Amino acid sequence: MRDDIITELSSNLVEENKDCELPPMELYLKETVLNTISNLSCGEKVWAKCYRSQCQVEHDILATIKDVECEYYDVIHINDYEYYLRNPVHIRNNGVYELVRSDHVMINCSGVENGIRQNKSFYSTGFRKYIKRRTAPEGREETLNVVILMIDSVSRNDFMISLPKSYDYLTKFLNGTILKGYNIVGDGSAGSLFPIFTGHSEEELSPYLTKNSTLRHVDVLPFIFYQLKRDGYRTAYMEDMPWLGNFEYKFNGFRHRPADHYLRHFYVMDAWEKPITERLCAGDTFLYQVMLNKTNQFLHFGNKIFCFTLISELTSNAVNFLSIADGALVTFLQTLVKEGHFRKTLLLVMGDHGSKFNEVKDTLHGRLEERLPFMCVILPEDLKRRQPDVEAVLRANADTRTTPYDVHATILDAVDLPQYMNRHKVAGAKIPRGMSLFKPIPRNRTCWEAGVEPHWCPCYSWVNVPSDDALYPRVAETLVRRKDRKSP
C-alpha cells in the first residue's frame, strides 16, 4: 500500500471514522480452544554446562562417572553463516573452563562408568566475561535495564489460554499492564522486529536489504543495540530458530555481532541435523528453558543491561506446545522478583503476532488474533518513583491503538535517549507514528496515524462507502491503475 493514491484514500476513509473501535475478542470461542500438550520430555543427561561465564561438569555426573576429561572448543563468530572452532582446552573432572573469547562452546567429554569409558559431545552457551564496553557518560551510569521476552505467534487469547498461571502472575502479582490495542504493522516476526529495533518498517528498509541488493549485510541499519552500546550498555540478542532467522531468511544477515552477546551459532550447532521432533530440546533441557535461564543469568551482570530474547521453536508452527512452558515462565518471573531485578528493569513480555499457520487463522477471529499479539509491560520501581504518574498514563494507553513503533520509542524514553527516536509522521498526520507508552497517546488515534496499513488494521469502525460518495469511483480507478501498471 505504498501507492500515493491508495494512501490518500486510506487516510480519508479512517478520517471519516475517527475513533477506532477495537473488536470484541471473546476468550473461549469454540474455534479457538487449544489442545494443550504436557507430556513432552528431553533426552539424556548433558555432562557439562555453562553458567554465565563458567563451564563445568555437572556434580551429579561426577558422582557416577569417574576420570572425566573434557575438551572445550570455543566457537568463534565470523558472520551469521560462518564460524570456526579454536584449538581445544583440556579440563579434568570438576575443573572450570571460563568463557573469554566466545559465548558458546563445543564440549567433548569422556569418562568411565561401570568400568567402560564413554564419549559424549555437547554444545553449551553462556556469556564471555570480558567485552569491549564503552564507559557510560557521566551521570548515566545507573540508567534502567530493559528486557524484552518475545514469544513467537502468540496472541493475547493464546497467552491467556495456554499460560494461565503466567498471565495471573503478570497481571495480579506484578501489576503488569496488558495492551489490548497492541497491533502488528507488518508480516511475520520481521514485520515486528524492524520497527522495534530501528523505528522503521521492514518495507521502508527492504529495498536495501534483499539478498539481491548490493548491500551485503544488515549491519549498517540504525539498530537500537548500537545506540545503547554507545551509551555503555551491555547487550544480548537470543533467537532460537536460526535457519529461519529474521535477518537471514529474506536478508543477508549480520557480518558482525549486532549485540555484545549474540547466541546464533549455539542454536545453529545445537539444531544441526536434528529432526524436528528433537528441536524443542537443547540436550536434556527444553530450549525455551535454556533461553529463560540465559536471560536471567545475563541480568546478573548488573547495571545498564539490554536483552532481547525471542522464543520461536516452541510456538512457531503450533501454539499447542506453549502450555508446557507455563510453570517455567512463572518461575522465571518469580526469580526476577526474588533477585530484585524489578527495581530498575523494564520488562516487556510479548508476542510478535498471533498464530499464522493453524485452522484458526482461516476464521475472522483468527485473522484478528494474528493482528493483535500479546503485550504486557511491567514497570521498574525506579521509574515509578521518578515519574509518579507513569503507571496511570500507561494504563490509560492500554485500550489505545499501539504498535511496535511505540515499543521502539518507549525503550528510548525509558533509557532517556530521546535523540534516537524516529519522529516520522505519516503524511498529513499531526502526531508521530511512534509514541512512547509513558506519554499520553490519543484515544482516537487511527491505524493510519499509527502507521498501520489497512490490511493489518482490525478496527471495527469501517463503513461501506455508498455508491454516490466521491470516493466510490476513485477506489475503482485506483485498482485499475495498479492492475495496468503490473501488465506487460
Image (cartoon, grey):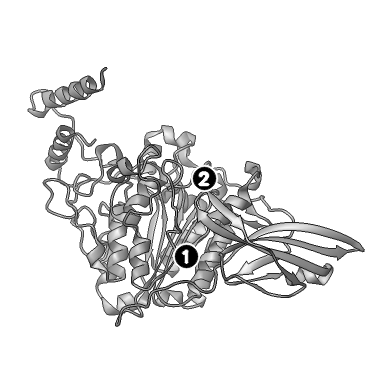
Amino acid residing under circle 1 = Tyr
Q: Tell me residue 411's x, y (percent).
A: 32, 64
Q: Tell me residue 294's x, y (percent).
A: 54, 65
* Local SS, label 2: helix
State which quadrant residue 390 falls in. bottom left
Q: Residue at 13% of width from left, 42% of height from top?
A: 15
* Residue to which mark 1 is pinned: 169
Within 10 angstroms of label 1, few (less than 14), some, or many (20 or more) residues?
some
Residue 179, disc: none
Judge from the rendering whether residue 247 lies leftward or rightward of residue 266; answer left or right: left
The C terminus, quarter of image = top left
State which quadrant residue 109 falls in. bottom right
Amino acid residing under circle 2 = Val
Count of all numbered marks drawn on residues in the image = 2
Q: Is residue 353 visible?
A: no
Residue at the top extreme of this rendering: 488
**Which one is closest to the eye, mark 2 or mark 1?**
2
Q: Residue at 57% of width from left, 46% of height from top?
A: 36
The N terminus, quarter of image = top left
* Residue to which mark 2 is pinned: 319
Residue at the right extreme of this rendering: 115
Disc 2 to disc 1, C-alpha distance:
20 Å
Residue 385 higher or lower than 221, as above or below:
below
* Local SS, label 1: helix
> Tags 2 and 1 in contact by the CB under 8 Å rule?
no
Judge from the rendering whether residue 117 lies leftward or rightward of residue 51; answer left or right: right
Q: Tell me residue 81's x, y (percent).
A: 52, 48
